[in-house]
Image (cartoon, rainbow, N blue to C red):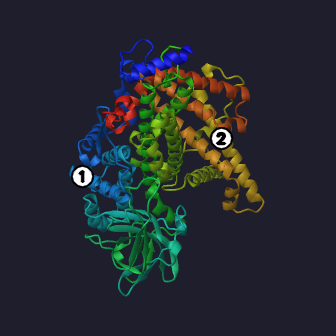
Amino acid sequence: MEQAFKRTQILTNHLLQSSPSSQTLSSNACLSYSPPELSENYAFDIKDMRKLIDRHNLEERDWLFGLMKQSKLFNPKVRGGKVFVSPDYNQSMEQQREMTLKRIEYLLEKGAFKGWLTEKGEDIEMRKFAGFEVCSIYDHSLFTKLGVHFFLWGGAIQFFGTKHHHDKWLRDTENYWIKGCFAMTELGHGSNVRGIETVTTYDSNTGEFVINTPCESAQKYWIGGAANHATHTVVFSQLHINGTNQGVHAFIVQIRDADGNISPNIRIVDCGHKIGLNGVDNGQIWFDNVRVPRENLLNSVADVSPDGKYLSSIENPDQRFAAFMAPLTVGRINIAISSVYQSKVALATSIRYALTRRAFSLKQNEPEVLLLDYPSHQRRLFPLVAKTYAMSFAANYLKMLYVKRTPQSNKTIHIVSSSFKATFTWNNMQILQECREACGGQGLKTENRVGQLKGEYDVQSTFEGDNLILMQQVSKALFAEYMAAQKRNKVFKGLGLEHMNKPCPVIPLQLTSTTLRCSQFQMDALCLRERDLLNRFVADVSKCKAKGESSEQAFMICYELAQDLGKAFSDRAIFQTFVDAETTLPAGSLKDVLGTLRSLYALICIEDVSFLQYGYLSVDNGANVRREITKLCTELRPHALALVSSFGIPDAFLGPIAFNWIEANAWSSV
């Protein structure tokens, strides 16, 4: 009865607006916002950390961030007294597409793309990478539409074309007078480029190529830019000369005039609404005996003479095909890099929220506990921070590998980019999901970004090659390296496989904390897994072939080992870049924190089920690894704000819940 009386008295006072007493409703002390900067300390210089993980073109990045923040085209909104920019996903698909185009035109006018195709050298390539990374932080549609235009269409002209193509097309492409797209994938064939069915023949009477879609499965599908805006495309087609199929070649085709009218003998329809990326106008294209001049063949690899003779300095069709595919690696590199930055956006938002959001009291009448002070929340998020730092160092390595490329390094770039693209995009989807859940219901709000990014970036798992297929390609390449070394009776050289030349590492019977945190042990454990899985894979494939199976059938049968081997290669290669970055630092707090992150990354790799499945770890040692991960998460707790602030992402590009989420949801704001 006493409790009922108290409740009645509270309601009476509330309804009569009586002055509150000790028993009346009052504001909960936990429901207040205090910026984490007031309570969290920085043990290291976050500017130095940003230089380490962003590595290059920091001023250009910040300039581009500023261009976006100052324009209404980037949809600025005030929440909780701060301005945030992000696309309006409530707009229709058509509106999102037009806004993406307007944003590109605005950035073009401000000089953001100057020299991207008409200048050469490492500096311009790194500036391009930085620009794409910033665009990806704002919006995947902006990033993708620019990528299709500059890296795919423009890159095809650069790499597959010769001087007369460069002179005719590159400047107009850089100035966006020509809007390009990239017609490779078809309804029937995506990753299997060799299997595309579009056919091109040569008419020596007119000096023209004739491009045709012979069946429905040959229609070009998912062609970004084709549905509305592109004026030209690079068409990948089987080239038939005098009845002989010379394989896949690339041709320039105009698909619209300057007024947007579709060219004769070309049909285009819209692919329609998607689960994300609706600011990109994906289309389907059919070619009904479309004629283009002979000069429109991109002829750096092969050419056709005016009288119809096929000419190529590369006689082997497989090598010719590989030469056509090699320049496309940059698409995978860009996708891999952009996925790292989405992970940064999600982690910066969710960790800042966890530093100010409280839930549940441990004792009655005590303040509720910050989310990030719960060990379970630390265990959920800090391993993802370690992954993101690891991916940042690996992305920097991949970029440098690409810009310093030589003909001899193309194979390495292909293998590493395939591995990293698959690993980074899978990691990104895991990180986005965990961060969405870590933000609770706030993670569902589009304006908070984390949940929306899941739909926007889901496609990256199949963009530029399905991840499972890419990992199988990695394992096939490792198999080839193994067989070549065995055949020549020489040591392994390249791809980081030099550890195969050394004695096999041994994991101690009892793993102590000191051992688990030792970088040499961590590298030994990752090398042991890769070494063993490569030996197993070679043995199993060889057994299948000994039973009469073809090489391709043998690889298919051993696909599970192939996946495990691909992951082992990727984890070890990424870890190596982390160690290399750490060794560049002098002793001090920055290096100490980075060492803790490095150990955490290594141990979450070693925690993988494969270490128990294949017997590299005992059950007891597996438990030791798990306990050490929990300790490392606890040690990183004081550095949480500094670690995500080092990402260098301006406040405006995060979600409102990263800051005063109470004010952002108050009556005055909403």
Report x, y in % for residue 95.
Answer: 33, 57
In the rendered view, would you say 623 is above or below 472?
above
> Tag 1, which secondary structure?
helix
Number of residues whose C-alpha sits closer than 10 Å to that of mark 2, classed few (under 14), some (14–19) or many (20 or more) = many
Of the residues under marks 1 and 2, which one precedes in the sequence?
Answer: 1
> Tag 2, which secondary structure?
helix
Number of residues whose C-alpha sits closer than 10 Å to that of mark 1, classed few (under 14), some (14–19) or many (20 or more) = some
Q: Quadrant of the C terminus?
A: top left
In the rendered view, would you say 203 is above or below 198?
below
Report x, y in % for residue 373.
Answer: 50, 21
Residue denoted by label 2:
531
Query: Disc 1 residue type?
Result: Tyr
Residue denoted by label 1:
106
Find residue 31 and report its image quarter. Answer: top left
Drawn side of residue 3 relative to residue 650, left or right: right
Query: Disc 2 residue type?
Result: Arg
Drawn side of residue 555 relative to residue 65, left or right: right
Report x, y in % for residue 465.
Answer: 52, 56
Disc ID at residue 212: none
